[in-house]
Each structure stands twice: as C-alpha cells, then as structure tokens.
C-alpha cells in the first residue's frame, strides 16, 4: 500500500471514529467537554510513558482515557455540588491539567518525540509513517489499524447501547424511572469518548480533535430530523471532509488535520446557510398561503 493511500485511509477512519460518538456528544450539548478531555489526557499519556517507556504501548491510551474520565466525573461532581455552574468546572480543570502535562513533557521527556506542537495539532502524516508489513508486503500504516479497532469498538458500543444512550440523552429522569442506570451509562459513554480522543491524539492533537468529534454531527443536526439520518449524514460529512481536507493539504503542502478541520468548517457554514434559506423559503410560503386563505374563504362564501 502506498503512503498516500495509507494516509488517506487513516484520515477517513480517524474521522469516522471521532464523528460517530460525536452524535450523542452534540445531542447532549457536551461539545466543550470533548475539549476538556482532549486537554486532560496529556498528563495521562506522560504518566503512562513514564511507566512503560514505550510510545506505542496500549497502556498509554488506557491511562490517558482514564485521566479524561476522571475529568468528566470531577466536572460532574463540581456541577452537582451546586457551588459552580455552567462550563466553569471544565474551565477550572482542564487548563491546569494540560499545563501540568506540558511542563512534564518539557522537563522530563525533552529527548522523546512527544513535543508540544504534535500535542496541540497532531500530525497525520507522521502518524502514518510507520507501515505494517506482512510477508514483505505493506498493508498500510500501523496507526490505521489502531484507529480501525477504535472505530469498531465505537460502532459496537453505540449499536449495543443505542436504546440506553438515546433515552438518557433526551430524558434522564424518565430513563432512571424505568431502571436504566443513568450515571453508569453516562460514565461508560464518556470513557468511550476519552478512548477515542486519546487514540486520535497523534492525528489531530488536543485542539483539532474537537473539530473531528463535533463538527460533522453539528452539521448533520442542521439537516436531519431523525436519529438514523443524523448518524448517516454525520458519517457522510466525516468522510467527505476527510477526503477533501486530505487532497487539499496534499495540493497545498499543508497540515492534513488542519486542512480537514477547515473543510469541516466550510461544510458547516454551507449547511447553516442552506438551512437558513430553507427556513426563509418555508416562512414565505406559509405567509403566502395565509394571505390567500381569507380571499379563498370570501370567494367560497360568495359562491354559496
């Protein structure tokens, strides 16, 4: 498999893996929580590397995902306490943790390829550099199969628990009344998001990963009315933005993950403008029908 093909496939798989859980993230209005998770996983990665001394160890993903889950649970605890409201708990937690992670990297692992630039924006091309070879034949980047495994886990979880996730998303008190463990479902889902964000760290970094998670689902939310169509359009936007961003970066010799984020932003703006035009057209049509209705009533009364 060529480097270009492998990198393109990695971009598509990473986009899908991030976008599908993003549907429930957007519906739950927890978009900024993804940003908090993305910033908080850095200390987990550093601590995981401190014990394993291996950047390819799966313990880094699990440790970082656990750190992200701790942030989620801590933010929820602060919110439930009633002392802090809104997004303030996230604003307190993740800047401190991310700063601590950057300090740990620069002080203890300056000689390790875990630099702050890659942490912030990621490097999809660098992530695709190491290829998996079987029988002397390259079958694609090693990181591609990591993200493919994460994508399969995401799909399996969302399929197995779609009923619980849907009910807890739209009506938490009702879910609790019919015996669904709301807190456990929420914790499991946010752990899944943490694993996904951590796995995508090499490709998108702490800043751009929020675009991969949130923007496709937010775009689809403007265009759809059912949950099934929301997932379908989200997947289509994720794939389309990844492909367009990859080839745009290839043509401009730019960062792939940044180009993908720009394409997602352009798609969202186009969808927003289309939705506004459709709403205005519908309102004009409704007003025209309302204006014709009295005239029609008067004509019918005269005919009678």
Image: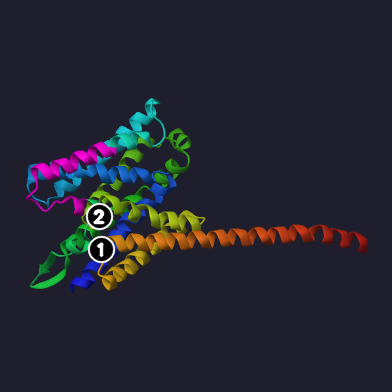
Residue for badge 2: 121
- In contact (CB < 8 Å): disc 1 and disc 2: yes
Q: Can residue 140 be seen at all in this image of the molecule?
A: yes
Residue at 38% over, 61% down: 264
Q: Quadrant of the N terminus?
A: bottom left
- Magenta span includes 107: yes
Residue 239 vertical placement versus 48 (above, below): below
209 relative to 265 in the view: left or right = left
Identified at 18% across, 43% down, the residue is: 102
User: Residue 291's x, y, as percent?
Assistant: 77, 59
Residue 255's tag is 1
Residue under the point 25% across and 36% down? 96
Instruction: Please tell me whether mark 1 sits on a helix, a strand or a loop.
Output: loop
Quarter placement of the C terminus: bottom right
Callout 2 secondary element: helix
The location of residue 125, given as percent across then percent down, is 20, 64
What segment is highlighted magenta in the picture?
94-119
Residue at figure coordinates x 84%, y 58% from the top left: 297
């Amino acid at each position: 498999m060529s480097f270009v093909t492998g990198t393109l496939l990695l971009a598509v798989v990473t986009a899908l893996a991030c976008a599908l859980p993003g549907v429930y993230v957007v519906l739950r209005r927890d978009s900024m929580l993804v940003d908090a998770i993305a910033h908080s996983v850095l200390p987990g990665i550093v601590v995981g590397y401190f014990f394993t001394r291996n950047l390819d160890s799966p313990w880094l993903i699990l440790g970082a995902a656990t750190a992200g889950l701790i942030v989620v649970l801590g933010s929820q605890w602060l919110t439930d306490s009633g002392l802090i409201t809104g997004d303030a708990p996230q604003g307190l937690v993740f800047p401190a943790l991310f700063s601590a992670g950057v300090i740990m990297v620069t002080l203890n692992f300056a000689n390790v390829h875990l630099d702050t630039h890659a942490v912030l924006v990621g490097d999809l091309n660098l992530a695709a550099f190491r290829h998996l070879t079987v029988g002397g034949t390259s079958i694609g980047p090693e990181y591609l199969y990591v993200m493919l495994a994460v994508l399969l886990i995401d799909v399996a979880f969302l399929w197995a628990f779609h009923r619980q996730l849907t009910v807890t998303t739209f009506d938490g008190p009702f879910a609790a009344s019919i015996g669904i463990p709301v807190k456990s479902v929420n914790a499991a889902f946010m752990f899944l998001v943490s694993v996904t964000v951590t796995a995508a760290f090499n490709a998108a970094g702490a800043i751009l990963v929020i675009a991969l998670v949130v923007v496709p689902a937010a775009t689809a939310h403007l265009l759809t009315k059912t949950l099934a169509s929301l997932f379908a359009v989200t997947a289509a936007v994720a794939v389309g933005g990844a492909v367009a961003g990859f080839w745009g970066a290839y043509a401009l010799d730019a960062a792939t993950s940044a180009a993908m984020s720009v394409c997602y932003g352009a798609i969202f703006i186009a969808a927003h403008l289309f939705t506004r035009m459709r709403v205005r057209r519908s309102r004009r049509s409704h007003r025209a029908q309302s204006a014709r209705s009295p005239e029609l009533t008067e004509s019918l009364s005269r005919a009678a």
